[in-house]
Image (spheres, coloured by chain):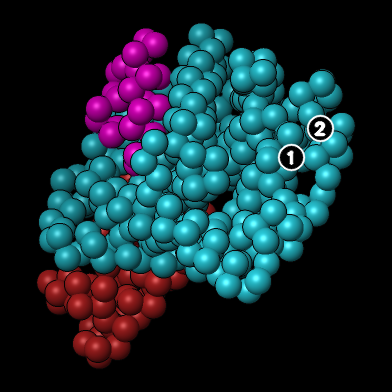
Amino acid sequence: MFDAFYPFDWLATQIVTQLGLSISSHLGSSLHFFLYDVPKVLTLLIVISFIVGTFQSFLEPERVRSLLEGKRTFAGNILAAMVGIVTPFCSCSAVPLFIGFLEAGVPLGVTFSYLMAAPMVNEVAVILLWGLFGLKVTLIYIGFGVGLVIASGYIIGLLKLEKWVEPFVWELQKSRQTMPLEDEDTLEPVALTWGQRFEQGRFQSSEIVRSVWLYVVGGIAIGAGIHGYVPTDFITQYAGANNPFAVPIAVILGVPLYANIAGVMPITEALVNKGMPMGTVLAFTMAVTALSLPEMVILKKVLRPQLLAVFVGLMTIGIISIGYIFNAIIN
Amino acid sequence: MNAIKIEILGTGCKKCQQLEANAKEAVANLNLNAEVSHITDPIEIAKRGVMSTPAMTINGKVVSKGQVISAEQIQPLLQR
């Protein structure tokens, strides 16, 4: 298959051999791993977050909301998950989005599918998966992730858990219906020029790179060390496919690592090379992005603890199952 | 003349802070009497009918949401 990253590979090989090291030596293979991964991942981060940032300015939540209004069935969950992936989303707008959707009559389960699709298919996680594990693994991840988000939202809808949403949300909905926002209270959004869209993309790209580059470089350095020096048996013995606890442990370890996925994923790359199964890595990645503690704290403002528990339970069971299924398929 | 009331809506991420700085710059450029406040409570934000942050209101009117607009873009909004 055509490899877009071949020039990075070639360059890394050149540098290592120019230094008089063999690619197969401990130090040589560590150095090659580092010199190849750092520019590759950083390039992907800059380019993709710029493109995503630019095109996200086309999809306003208001438009998505009117698309989803009154959709009750399974189809609503599918549609919600699809648009959730591509909607502009800053975790700080989770609560306003949640309230805004319910206010407009979007069903609870459909709202959940929408709300969770964005963090599940978090752009930094997807870029790292692509850069480190390839396109196939990335597409499988997105497929399973979206499937889980659709299923969880659908189940929450079936269970009729509206009673576990904080009552003030429904009061807001009632008051909004009797007294809709007057037209003059909101202006039509200023039409954006391409220059401004590119500017939003550039802003987003520089924010992302600035906040994660250090973790990426650090993680790759650690991964490089593991790649060159840790013996293969070690990993297969402790985190291999025959350890039934590897997947749940990976999920539990993943939850508190929200912000540091950029640093942790390069380490998992080295572990996969040493025999850690891919399903374990996918489950870990999903746990880090979809079950983040900060997100839970924010959602607690609008959800009763019972609903939060149902949601976390569904996602956890789903993620662990995906890990096992994937490990079983691949081996 | 009454002070113009500007509200920045956003839970405090980088984009919201940037928008607040831009708003203050616009006010300073025009030499206006304005009061800029930052609303971080997500429930207050939702009450203003806003779903995407950062957003900005001028005298209670939502003028921008979901993007960081520059001081140059804010100035004409303040002069209306």
Give the extent of the magenta segment.
A64-87
Q: Is residue A298 visible?
A: yes
In terms of depth relative to the viewer, which is nearer, A296 or A143?
A143
- The residue that label 1 is drawn on is A274
In this picture, residue A40 sits left or right of residue A199:
right
Lower sequence index among marks 2 and 1: 2
Q: Is there CB contact under 8 Å for labels 2 and 1?
A: yes
Q: Give the x, y percent position of residue A283.
A: 65, 30
**Label 2 sits on what residue type?**
Thr
Which residue: 48% across, 43% down?
Answer: A130
| Residue nearest the observer in this picture, B18 or A163 | B18
User: What's the amino acid at mark 1?
Assistant: Lys
Residues A96 and A213: in front is A213
Q: Is residue A84 above or below residue B2?
A: above
The residue carrying mark 2 is: A236
| Chain name for mark 1 | A
Marks 2/1 same chain: yes
Q: Is residue B48 visible?
A: no
Residue B39 image offset from top left, x and y in percent: 46, 61
Residue B50 vs B24, above or below: the answer is: above
Q: Colour of chain B?
A: red
Q: Residue at x 68, y 40 (%)?
A: A273
> Quick one: quadrant of the N terminus of chain A?
top left
**Marks 2/1: CA distance?**
7 Å
User: Would residue B25 be found to the left or right of residue A198 on screen?
Assistant: right
Residue at image location 40% in from the left, 27% down from the top: A81
Tell me what hue chain A is rendered in: cyan
